[in-house]
Amino acid sequence: MKRRASRSRSGFTLIEVILAITIFSLIALILYSATYLSRRAAAKAALAAEAGQRERMLGSFVGGYFRSAFSYRSSPQDQAIFFYGEQTRVTFISALSRGLGGRGLAKVTLEWDGEKGDPLTLEEEIPVRFSKDDEISGYRNRTVLYPAVDEFEIRYLPPDGAAADWVDSWDGAETKSLPRAVRLRLSAPGGVKREWVVPIMVKALVR
């Protein structure tokens, strides 16, 4: 009677090892991809939320100054009103003074230098003064409203203008009035495009 030799099988074959490594690598890749995509989505959502919050604050912050713009004249005889606006810069007098807790007059300048990537800034100066000889110490604060701007435009609506009558500049000394509204358009990196139309509540004040 012939005896058959039996071989006990121990360990793994090379093919089984390769298959196990391949499957493990695929699982690791899938897990990494899922983690990376979820982190990227969370980062995008956080950036979008931050940008949206910044834009809402910008509209509210700047809009408050414009809505409180004054028809400021140096005297009853002088009909010139202090409001000078261009496409990327505007200076006017506002009754909203954040430096004084929201009360009092402030000279406000909203400005973008015009180069892609430059910040949009707002400067508030208290007290309101126009004489260079005035040595009264005051408060001046410059705030960066948007850190990097690709394009920024300000336009002005005349008091008797229609919706299509927006103009590129405003000279209160020449027009003897404030515009009825201002329109702000901003473009920023990341495809951000925003527009705000702010009505001006006309008030009068003389020295």
Image (cartoon, grey):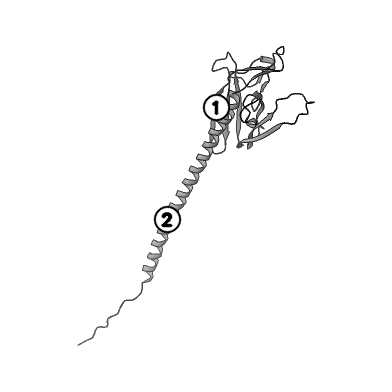
Q: Which of pointers 2 and 1 indicates the residue nearer the eye?
A: 1
SS for dot 1 = strand
Q: Mark 1 points at which residue?
A: 196
* Amino acid type indicated by mark 1: Trp
Identify which residue, 62 or 14, lies in the foreground: 62
Q: Where is residue 155 in the image (x, y as percent from the top left)?
A: 60, 23
SS for dot 2 = helix
Q: Mark 2 points at which residue?
A: 31
Query: Image check: 5 left or right of 183?
Result: left
Answer above or below: position of 180 versus 196.
above
Q: Position of residue 26 (x, y in %)?
A: 41, 58
Q: Where is residue 181 in the image (x, y as percent from the top left)?
A: 58, 20
The Cα atoms of the two marked residues, 2 and 1, are separated by 44 Å
How crowded pointer 1 is (Cα within 10 Å; few <14, some 14-19, many 20+) is rated as some
Query: Image check: 34 left or right of 165?
Result: left
* Amino acid type indicated by mark 2: Leu
Q: Position of residue 168 (x, y in %)?
A: 63, 22
Identify which residue, 57 or 148, lies in the foreground: 57
Classify residue 121 by image quadrant: top right
Among the two numbered marks 2 and 1 on one chain, the one whose residue lies closer to the N terminus: 2
* Label 2 close to label 1 by CB (< 8 Å): no
- List the single residue furthest toward the top: 77
Question: Residue drawn at (23%, 86%), measured in percent from left and top?
Answer: 3
Identify which residue, 142 or 42, lies in the foreground: 142
Classify residue 81 by image quadrant: top right
Identify which residue, 163 or 62, lies in the foreground: 62
Question: Residue drawn at (67%, 34%), measured in percent from left and top?
Answer: 141
Quadrant, the N terminus:
bottom left
How crowded pointer 2 is (Cα within 10 Å; few <14, some 14-19, many 20+) is rated as few
